[in-house]
Image (cartoon, rainbow, N blue to C red):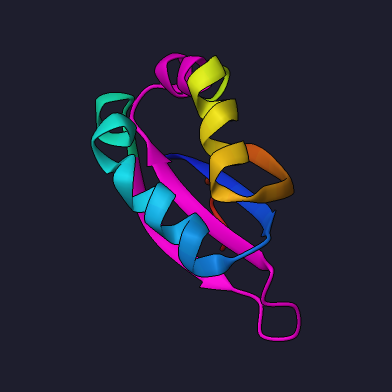
Amino acid sequence: MIVLLCRNRVVDYSKWKAVLDSHADAHRESGLHLKELWQDIERPENVFFVFEVDSLEKARAFINTPGAAEAGRASGVLDGEYHFLESRPHY
């Protein structure tokens, strides 16, 4: 399984979350399924979230669109990072 692990540092969590939620259909159309969302207890401006990825190519295309960058600006993202990860046996 491939996941997309993201961290965003945001100005306002509520505003950021509203924009994230408004893009749920676009995420699904790009093969991204939000699985987990966390907010840092010590630094609440940091949010972490994980999408399960159906198609690496579609996911990469989605996050590299100008619309994705604009949504980040509109939601108050100050900086962030993302990583595509593949699960491995751990036993």
Q: Which residue occupies 61% across, 64% down?
A: 47
Q: Is residue 86 visible?
A: no
Vertical side of 66 occupied by 70: above or below? below
- Examine the rendered structure and indicate whether residue 66 appears above or below residue 75: above
Task: Report the residue at 56% width, 28% height from top.
Answer: 70
Q: Which residues are magenta?
A: 33-62
Q: Residue at x 51, y 35 (%)?
A: 71
Query: Where, by quadrant of the figure, is residue 86 drawn?
Result: top right
User: 46 left or right of 74?
Assistant: right
Decide if residue 56 is in sight here.
Answer: yes
Question: Which percent across, then down, holds residue 34?
Answer: 36, 51
User: Residue 16: where, in percent of width, then height?
Assistant: 51, 56
Q: Is residue 45 magenta?
A: yes
Quadrant for residue 11, please give it. Answer: bottom right
**Is 86 within the magenta?**
no
**Total number of numbered discs in the rendering:** 0
Q: Position of residue 67 (x, y in %)?
A: 49, 22
